[in-house]
């Protein structure tokens, strides 16, 4: 006899439908599996056979053939155990095949017939919905996560036997109910707040501008000046997560198995701070069986590179392409995988190896040492940092002082500026000022006569490169948006000029 | 005696390791000719004249290179680099007062004039903005009055001295601690080129000599020897500049030290010099007075007229100091918002009143 069971495989972060076909026929008894299977899928046959026997079913000594179609896509993961078992039982006449047509089955099996949780549930249910299925049978632990997909009936299963009973008696199927509070009020409740940062007006302002336009930001300053502290609080002033965004982010975490069991969705924007010994593969994602890397895990939030000059040059270089394209493509023998990389990059560094330059009363680094230290950072990456800001150490008075504005106040301003940007850039495929290309800059960053004269003066007197010029315009546009100003005024330009990246001559050139 | 030949042999002798100015001179006084020194066998040199064994070994080894050094001299000649010995008229008489005056000087450009006063400006390589600007200003003012400015073409204060003098279109001379063809540090390449044309660069080291640390105290004696007064701008507690100062004292030169705050590590050396009796450098006129030069006008650190500035610009400007301050600090003390402050600072920078020394650090311009 022959049977079909629907399930979902995962490729990158997206799920795609897979049909498990089983055929039980006369012939030399045996168990054959085909369909371009990874070894963990191939091993499923032993788990499945044992689990079926231990669940109290008896398989006749016949030839069993399993095919996972489409047969030209590589199947990975352990979520195929349960659908294979069901397909075998259906083909053996133990399960009524009529119930299998409109549902998706996913889960790992233990030898005793227990159903174990799988990764990437969110992607599975989303793909099931797209495929027009109405019900998903998932491991009990994954039910919460599956419920996020609207309009999908989710049923949790603990044991293989239980699933068989459900399928043979559809009226007994219990559908899990979604609690209302899954988008919890925990939204935007971060355990830190900008009001905890005392003083540091410059740092605050620069961070606000950076977040408003999704500009990458570089903090420079001595140890203990609050660089990391400010960076950690960037997610708290980013716009509130929408449900769609949240699902997108949670999918990645689900695939990596990083979602907490009791909470199906991330309630916060991610903040990832990889150690500077990280390898390029860990940053971008990869491995023989590709997994999302730090840049994807930070998607929708902040990727913070602390001690930027200490990172391997190669690790940093690989960030360049995803920074532009906002996604990362990993190619392996078995195919290529797309992961999102929609991040704001913030980085922190000391100005020299002792950290005190240009305070010459403390710093004894020679010009050359300072230059060498700076030269460790890749120039192309530096070029992608729109805003750089100096963090100065706190005075005692400031440490004692009360904090400044809270994150929610800043967030309101940022959200306003983001809406202005979105409306302006509608239809162009980009959402933020920082992603503006040359044509957008020409269209949206028009200057008045007085501003042009001013910028010309700055340009000639300060030796700014063409790339620096565009950067100034983009940042000035964001500053104008924050103030709700339609045109870019002189003061917006002046502030943007102040944030511009140090160009080579700026470092130590003046002391020569 | 053929003078040309003698110079060639002296040039060769200057290349031999362990043969310093004093050894060469005492040998010359005993033997009478450099050519004859060359012809003496090494062992004899050791026995009769007490030259160390190490030096003799090198001496023998280097005998082969005589032709090389001759060719090298021709090369130098093509590039307008002269080799000047104490027997030449050109040789600065100021140096002859040194007990260990160099037996040969490689010179590119001019040499300091005998009848014009000369002043050395020296100080730390890793200097503060205050030191840099003061050095530039004082050197410029003195150079305008016809004083020849002498320094060591190093980074920091040395470079600032040369730059100030060049900008004032005065005469300035650099004394190197390495061969004349080697530009060290590289960041002074512009000065190195410019001074070859407009001023002068000199060194006692042969063209192949690398900038080794032990060379610098040696060249310091030439800096102090060439000058009538020595100005020390910034020096740490232990500093090469203090060596020059004590050398200068031995040579009977007047020492001026720029006073600084007692808390600044870079002023400790200077303040100590003052405590020990050095003259206080309060401005270019201290030096002019000592050299009895009438300046005609009173030199002051020029006061910026605040008339042209708006109220807020004044507020920000008054927060600034010669010592650069971080933007954060300026924002804090001025009480203005970040964007206002950045606006005003850029305005002031464009007006030339403020200088941004490094990323987001601003100081007053002298």
Image (cartoon, coloured by chain):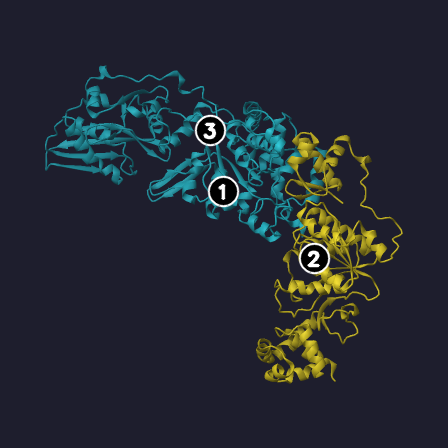
- Note whether residue A254 is visible: yes
Residue A1 seen from this side: no
Please state the horizontal and vertical placement of residue B70, each as a whole percent of the image. Answer: 65, 77
x and y percentages locating residue A403 in the rendered image: 58, 26
Q: Which residue is mark 2?
A: B242
Q: Which residue is mark 3?
A: A269
**In the picture provided, is A320 more to the left or to the right than A438?**
left
Check disc 3 and report its element: helix, strand or loop.
loop
Mark found first going from the N terminus, 3 or 1: 3
Q: Nearer the viewer, residue B212 or B191?
A: B212
Percent x, y for residue B187? 65, 55
Residue, x 53% and y 39% (percent of image)?
A347
Asked whether A499 or B141 is in front, the reply is B141
**Is B103 placed above or below A486 here?**
below
Q: Please give the chain letter of the residue carrying mark 1.
A: A
- Disc 1 target residue: A320
Crowd around label 2: few <14 · some 14–19 · many ≥20 (10 Å): many
């Amino acid at each position: 006899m022959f049977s079909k069971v629907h399930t979902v495989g995962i490729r990158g972060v997206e799920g795609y439908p897979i049909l498990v076909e089983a055929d039980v026929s006369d012939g030399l008894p045996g168990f054959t599996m085909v369909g371009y299977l990874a070894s963990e899928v191939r091993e499923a046959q032993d788990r499945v056979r044992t689990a079926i026997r231990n669940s109290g079913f008896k398989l006749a000594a016949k030839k069993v053939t399993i095919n996972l179609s489409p047969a030209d896509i590589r199947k990975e993961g352990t979520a195929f155990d349960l659908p294979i078992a069901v397909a075998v039982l259906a083909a053996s006449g133990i399960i009524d095949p009529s119930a299998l047509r409109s549902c998706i089955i996913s889960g790992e099996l233990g030898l005793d017939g227990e159903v174990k949780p799988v990764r990437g549930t969110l992607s599975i249910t989303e793909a099931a919905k797209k495929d027009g299925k109405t019900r998903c049978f998932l491991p009990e632990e994954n039910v919460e996560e599956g419920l996020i997909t609207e309009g999908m009936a989710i049923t949790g299963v603990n044991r293989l036997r239980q699933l068989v009973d459900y399928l043979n008696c559809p009226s007994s199927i219990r559908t899990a109910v979604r609690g209302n509070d899954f988008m919890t009020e925990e939204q935007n409740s971060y355990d830190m707040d900008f009001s905890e940062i005392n003083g540091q007006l410059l740092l605050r302002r620069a961070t606000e501008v950076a977040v408003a336009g999704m500009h990458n930001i570089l903090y420079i300053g001595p140890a203990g000046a609050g660089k990391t502290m400010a960076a950690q609080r960037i997610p708290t002033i980013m716009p509130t997560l929408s449900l769609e965004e949240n699902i997108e982010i949670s999918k990645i975490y689900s695939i990596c198995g990083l979602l907490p069991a009791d909470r199906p969705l991330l309630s916060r924007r991610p903040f990832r701070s990889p150690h500077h010994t990280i390898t390029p593969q860990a940053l971008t994602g990869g491995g023989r069986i590709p997994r999302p890397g730090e840049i994807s895990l930070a998607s929708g939030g902040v990727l913070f590179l602390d001690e930027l000059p200490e990172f391997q040059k190669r690790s940093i270089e690989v960030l360049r392409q995803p920074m532009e394209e906002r996604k990362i493509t990993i190619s392996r023998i078995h195919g290529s995988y797309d992961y999102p990389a929609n991040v704001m990059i913030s980085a922190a560094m000391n100005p020299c190896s002792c950290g005190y330059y240009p305070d010459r009363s403390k710093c004894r680094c020679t010009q050359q040492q300072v230059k060498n230290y700076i030269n460790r950072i890749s120039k192309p990456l530096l070029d992608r940092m729109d805003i750089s800001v100096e963090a100065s150490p706190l005075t005692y008075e400031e440490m004692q002082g009360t904090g400044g504005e809270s994150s929610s106040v800043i967030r309101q301003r940022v959200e306003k500026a983001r809406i202005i940007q979105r409306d302006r850039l509608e239809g162009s495929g980009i959402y933020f000022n920082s992603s503006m290309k040359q044509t957008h800059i020409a269209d949206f960053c028009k200057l008045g006569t007085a501003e042009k004269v001013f910028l010309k003066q700055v340009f000639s007197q300060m030796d700014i490169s063409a790339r620096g010029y565009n950067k100034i315009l983009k940042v000035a546009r964001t500053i104008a948006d924050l103030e709700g100003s339609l045109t870019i005024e002189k003061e917006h330009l002046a502030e943007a000029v102040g944030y511009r990246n140090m160009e080579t001559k700026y470092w130590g050139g003046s002391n020569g | 005696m053929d003078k040309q030949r003698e110079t060639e042999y002296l040039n060769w002798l200057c290349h031999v390791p362990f043969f310093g100015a004093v050894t060469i001179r005492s040998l010359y006084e005993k033997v009478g000719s450099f050519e004859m020194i060359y012809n003496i066998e090494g062992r004899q040199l050791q026995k009769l004249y007490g030259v160390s064994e190490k030096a003799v070994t090198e001496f023998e080894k280097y005998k082969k290179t005589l032709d090389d050094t001759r060719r090298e001299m021709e090369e130098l000649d093509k590039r307008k680099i002269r080799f000047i010995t104490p027997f030449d008229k050109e040789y600065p008489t100021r140096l002859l007062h040194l007990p260990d005056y160099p037996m040969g000087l490689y010179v590119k450009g001019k040499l300091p004039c005998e009848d014009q006063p000369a002043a050395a400006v020296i100080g730390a390589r890793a200097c503060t903005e205050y030191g840099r600007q003061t050095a530039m200003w004082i050197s410029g003012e003195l150079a305008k009055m016809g004083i020849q400015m002498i320094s060591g073409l190093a980074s920091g204060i040395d470079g600032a001295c040369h730059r100030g003098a060049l900008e004032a279109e005065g005469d300035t001379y650099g004394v190197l601690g390495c061969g004349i063809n080697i530009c060290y540090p590289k960041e002074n390449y512009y000065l190195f080129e410019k001074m070859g044309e407009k001023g002068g660069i000199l060194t006692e080291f042969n063209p192949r000599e690398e900038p080794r640390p032990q060379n610098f105290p040696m060249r310091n004696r030439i800096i102090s020897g060439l000058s009538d007064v020595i100005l020390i701008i910034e020096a740490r507690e232990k500093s090469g500049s203090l060596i020059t100062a004590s050398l200068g004292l031995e040579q009977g030169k007047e020492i001026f030290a720029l006073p600084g705050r007692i808390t600044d590590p870079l002023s400790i050396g200077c303040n100590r010099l003052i405590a020990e009796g050095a003259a206080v450098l309060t401005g270019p006129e201290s030096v002019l007075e000592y050299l009895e030069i009438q300046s005609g006008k009173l030199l002051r650190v020029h006061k910026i007229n605040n008339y042209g500035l708006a109220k807020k610009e004044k507020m920000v400007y008054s927060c600034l100091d010669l010592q650069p301050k971080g933007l954060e600090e300026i924002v804090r003390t001025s009480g203005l918002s970040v964007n206002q402050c950045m606006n005003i600072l850029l305005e002031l920078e464009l007006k030339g009143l403020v200088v941004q020394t490094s990323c987001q650090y601003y100081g007053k311009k002298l």
